[in-house]
Amino acid sequence: ELKVEQNPLFLSMQEGKNYTIYCNYSTTSDRLYWYRQDPGKSLESLFVLLSNGAVKQEGRLMASLDTKARLSTLHITAAVHDLSATYFCAVDPYGGSQGNLIFGKGTKLSVKP
Amino acid sequence: EAGVTQSPTHLIKTRGQQATLRCSPISGHTSVYWYQQALGLGLQFLLWYDEGEERNRGNFPPRFSGRQFPNYSSELNVNALELEDSALYLCARSLVEVICPQHFGEGTRLSIL
């Protein structure tokens, strides 16, 4: 069974702190997606990681991919309140041929002053 | 970038009724994907349409169906509604499904009473 597991599922941080969200997946996939979802809103694409060792950074967020370990991380640096949201990782184990992404359950991040 | 438009925003139905949800096209986007986001279950893949044809469907009963029109807009139909169908239904588009992240609409919140 294809599984994508994120941890933690809930994360309460103080502003200015660093933390990492982990995404493990159970099958081979050479592409991994990170999305952000604000309450009541749709999903916003953050990163697409296409190869082993890929690292992408945008502002205070940095994502990396280790396809051998089947692990992606989303690192948050010096968190600010605006980063409060739910973060999802997703994999495409079919190389686009099946049209669907397999999502993790999401990590709900709350950044407090 | 032009967004993915879904309608209606909210839909309230009773058990046994039928619901129709709509997704508007983006110029050049031939594929459309439907996902269900039920509380506590994360995003689950429902259907994939491309060039008017159903290409793949997720693990949902046949009462979930859809279609894609010549202008690439799409409808999701849910028959014989059940309480557990209450969820946020998201439509996503992708120009090149292999590497392009799927861009999501704001969703239709379907509530079954």
Image (spheres, grey):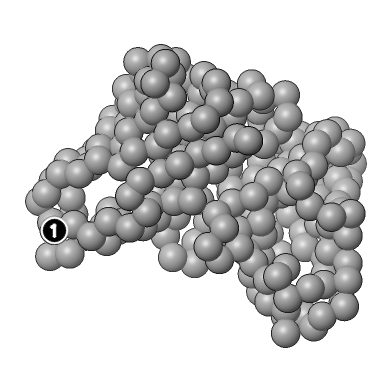
Chain letter of disc 1? A
Residue B52: image quadrant is top right
Residue B64: image quadrant is bottom right
How many badges with numbers are in the image? 1
In this picture, residue B40 sits left or right of residue B11: left
In this picture, residue A17 sits left or right of residue A47: left
Q: Label 1: state its secondary structure.
A: strand
Q: Is B46 drawn above or below residue B18 in the view shown?
A: above
In this view of the protein, can residue A36 be seen by the observer? no
Q: On the rendered image, what quadrant is the C terminus of chain A found in?
A: bottom left
* Residue hosting label 1: A14
Instruction: Look at label 1 and name its amino acid.
Output: Gln
Q: Is A9 drawn above or below residue B85 in the view shown?
A: above
Q: Position of residue A92 (x, y in %)?
A: 59, 29
Q: Position of residue A69 (x, y in %)?
A: 39, 21
Q: Is B44 drawn above or below residue B13 in the view shown?
A: above
